[in-house]
Image (cartoon, rainbow, N blue to C red):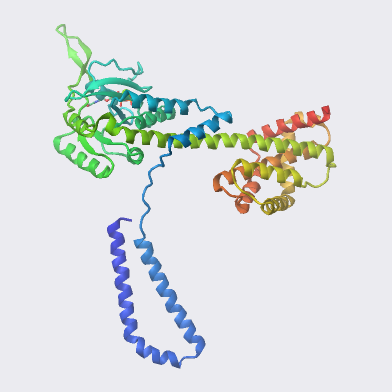
Amino acid sequence: MSRRLRLLFAALALAALLWLMFAAAERALALAQRFLELPTYLQWTLGGLLLAFAAVGLSVLWWLLRPRRKRRPPPVPDRGSLEQRIGQLREHGADTGALAAELGELDRRRLGARLYVAVFGEISTGKSSLIRALAPHAQLVSDARGGTTRAVSHYDSTLPDGRNLVLADVPGSRESGGEARETAAREEALRAHVVIYLCAGDLTRAQVDELRWLADFGKPLLLVLNKADQWSATERDQLLARLRQQSRGIASAVVAISAGGSERYQRQLADGSSESVERQRKPDIDPLLQALSRLTAPGAEGLEQLRENAVLAGLHQRTGTLEAQTRAEQAERIVRKYARRAIVGAVAAVAPGSDLVIQGALATGLTRALAELYGVKVSEVQIEDFVRQAKLTLRTGSSIVLAVAGNALKAFPGLGTLGGGVLHAFAYALIFDSMGRALAASLAERHTLDQDDAGARLKELLADAGSGRMRKLAALTAEAMREKTDD
Ligand SMILES: Nc1nc2c(ncn2[C@@H]2O[C@H](COP(=O)(O)OP(=O)(O)OP(=O)(O)O)[C@@H](O)[C@H]2O)c(=O)[nH]1
Ligand SMILES: [Mg+2]
């Protein structure tokens, strides 16, 4: 809802409230008289209703006028803590090469003290053409077919005032199937001192989001409308006005240019035949050069702190993603270990046909190990509660689990050769796998042992007979049972 509309509603609500208060005041005296004459229970009912009415009015007012939450910029960690986290990840066997390389590049560029400008935007908006116009002698790298940019490349260029800069040509975003290239482009944009965001018309919602994403990292931005030659002067001015509105508070300047690019046309030859010729359009990028000179006036050193903050904030996010991934892998190993133990235990102790009962000691161990992995403090009582709840879930869900296990036995005939007890063994693999996954997912998301959430996930997983998961559990069951019989 727009702010104006909200204010209008607020004014209306206020007027209604005032009117009510006046009307109430006017009648208050008369009412008071009659009120006092009423029996006590009616006095209370009437009073309660009035109070409820006022409460509703006030909450509507609050809803309309409540402060909107501002977008929060991504946090900038200090370098030391980031290095420590990366070190820990490395110790856990995670591939931290890219993160370390990013830190290395951060230092390399700081020491080089050159001014980096990235040309960023959706595919085919004319980024490479603009680089050609800004660095006429550069040999651009692009895919032979279609001229699409596939990787980040750098080119030397000079501003009209003689200052040197390094231009980064990056792959276009929002290319279908080009997610990895888009990530590379975004990372390069964070490494630059200034970003030129190129578009070729009105901004789509995705483009606005992309611009906001850059602005959230504190990136100095120029929003540049390319291919201005395709519009009349009036159309171009209208477009510029809309772009200014869409990028208010985000872009430092909005300008229109023609990067040039090439066009094909048919040339008539003297003998009457024709040939197709490619020629370069004449670029017109003066407004951009002026805006770029202004925005880069502080120079590489003046803009370095902003740049470093953006790179560190980006690294913080990437490190967080790798941490979550590494933890998920560790969780999977823990779950596998306990599921295996449960299978072995089942083969040793469960008589065929008997009920399924969660092995308490194993369930407790699994819960404790996962809580520790996710850094969640849990008390013995909480663990006991969770295990008790899981046991209850299983008591009512036993038939489902056995049915799922039975189907798996049919689907993987090899299991049948393992002899008696295999149905129970598989059922226990399924139970412990479900319990572990439910706990891990809940702990990762809630950062606490939330019984209800973990319980709901457990129920879902016990009945989930996805074929990939069943295949893994069948393999685990076969492996554990064979090992057991080999003992
Ligand atoms: N009319 C017009 N066409 C342009 C202009 N600039 C670029 N083009 C054309 O737009 C198309 C895409 O240009 P590129 O420079 O390859 O665009 P890009 O953004 O680098 O594309 P990707 O690398 O695939 O993301 C080409 O056909 C260019 O000739 C311009 O100023 N005017
Ligand atoms: Mg390109």
Picture coordinates of residue 16, whole percent (x, y): 31, 73
Left or right: where does residue 350 sit relative to residue 398?
Answer: right
Name which residue lies at 36% across and 55% down: 68
Position of 238 compared to 113: left or right? left
Residue at (30% x, 80% y) in the render: 22
As rendered, which of 234 and 135 lies closer to the eye? 135
Foreground of the two, 138 or 302: 302
Residue 240 shows up from this direction = yes
Residue 158 in the image: above or below residue 406: above
Report which quarter residue 133 is drawn in.
top left
Residue 397 relative to residue 32: left or right: right
Q: Quarter holding the N terminus?
A: bottom left
- Name the foreground residue: 167 vs 47: 167
Residue extending farthest right: 351
- Residue 404, located in which quarter of the rendered image? top right
Above or below residue 69? Residue 315 is above
Foreground pick, 240 / 249: 249
**Total numbered badges shown on the rendered structure:** 0
Q: Where residue 458 sits in the image (x, y, percent)?
A: 65, 47
Instruction: Determine whether 17 is above or below 414 in the image.
Output: below
Query: What's the residue at 39%, 25% (across, down)?
Result: 105
Residue 164 against residue 55 in the figure, above or below: above
Give the residue at x 27% y 33%: 302
Q: Residue 413 placed where, x, y %? A: 75, 30
Residue 363 rendering spot, x and y as whole percentages: 72, 45
